[in-house]
Amino acid sequence: MHSEAVASRSAEHRDSSRESRRDSPRESRNGTPQLDAVSLAIIQQLQEDGRRPYAAIGKAVGLSEAAVRQRVQKLLDQGVMQIVAVTDPLTVGFRRQAMVGIHVEGDVESIADALTGMSEVEYVVMTAGSFDILAEVVCEDDDHLLGVINQRIRALPGVRSTESFVYLKLKKQTYMWGTR
């Protein structure tokens, strides 16, 4: 009886390994993961509900629970996605948010790297347009925001000027853009 259970588990592991390898995310020549239809469907399932059980995802996409678990882990390891709790900053004590537009003199990337190291900065993007960088800042209050902008962001060598767009009310915050 025991040997039958071991053989059954071993066969299931072989099947799930085959399912996981078949059409699983691979890297393209430029190092970006190429996602097949099954991986995209898994991502969509998790975007709808990040706590959805692997068994339910497997049923929806046609894989075993073990194969889904392996696919999800690979997507996480490759940096394709993250599974996180998204909060409304106001409800957890952060009363002031702002988007800060930054004009840079010199190396934009070094400023962007410095911004990513600041705990108050949640989002950094290098842009083509009227600003070189946009950074979303989440702070406890106006004094905290002023300190971050004046004493930390503007103090970075190469920051020429900043313009702040203070959020008055958060109407929509979602990460449900789906997959294409």
Image (cartoon, rainbow, N blue to C red):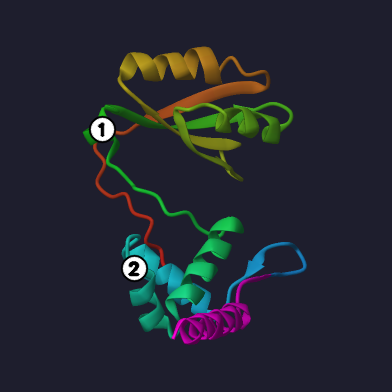
Q: Residue furthest front?
A: 1
The magenta stretch is 1-26
Measured as percent of width and height from the top left, residue 141 is found at 30, 20
First of labels 1, 2 by sequence position: 2
Which amino acid, by three-letter code, is at mark 2?
Answer: Pro
Which numbered marker is on residue 53? 2
Which numbered marker is on residue 114? none
Taking the spot 59% from the left edge, 57% from the top edge, the residue there is 77
Tell whether label 2 touches label 1 (CB within 8 Å). Answer: no
Q: How many marks?
A: 2
Measured as percent of width and height from the top left, residue 30 is found at 75, 63
The residue indicated by pointer 1 is 92
Taking the spot 38% from the left edge, 65% from the top edge, the residue there is 46
Q: Residues within 10 Å of mark 1 (few under 14, many from 20)?
A: few
SS class of the residue under badge 1? helix
Q: Is residue 18 above or below residue 135?
A: below
- Classify the position of the N terminus by image quarter: bottom left
**Magenta portion: prevailing SS class:** helix
Measured as percent of width and height from the top left, residue 10 is found at 55, 81
Which amino acid, by three-letter code, is at mark 1?
Answer: Val
Measured as percent of width and height from the top left, residue 35 is found at 58, 73
Q: Name the one closer to the observer, 120 or 60.
A: 60
Q: Residues within 10 Å of mark 2 (few under 14, many from 20)?
A: some
Task: Place residue 165 in its image quadrant.
Answer: top left
Taking the spot 67% from the left edge, 63% from the top edge, the residue there is 32
Q: Is residue 115 above or below residue 82?
A: above
Q: Would residue 179 be visible to someone looking at this image? A: no
Q: Nearer the viewer, mark 1 or mark 2?
A: 2
Find out whether residue 8 is within the magenta segment.
yes
Q: Is residue 48 above or below residue 6?
A: above
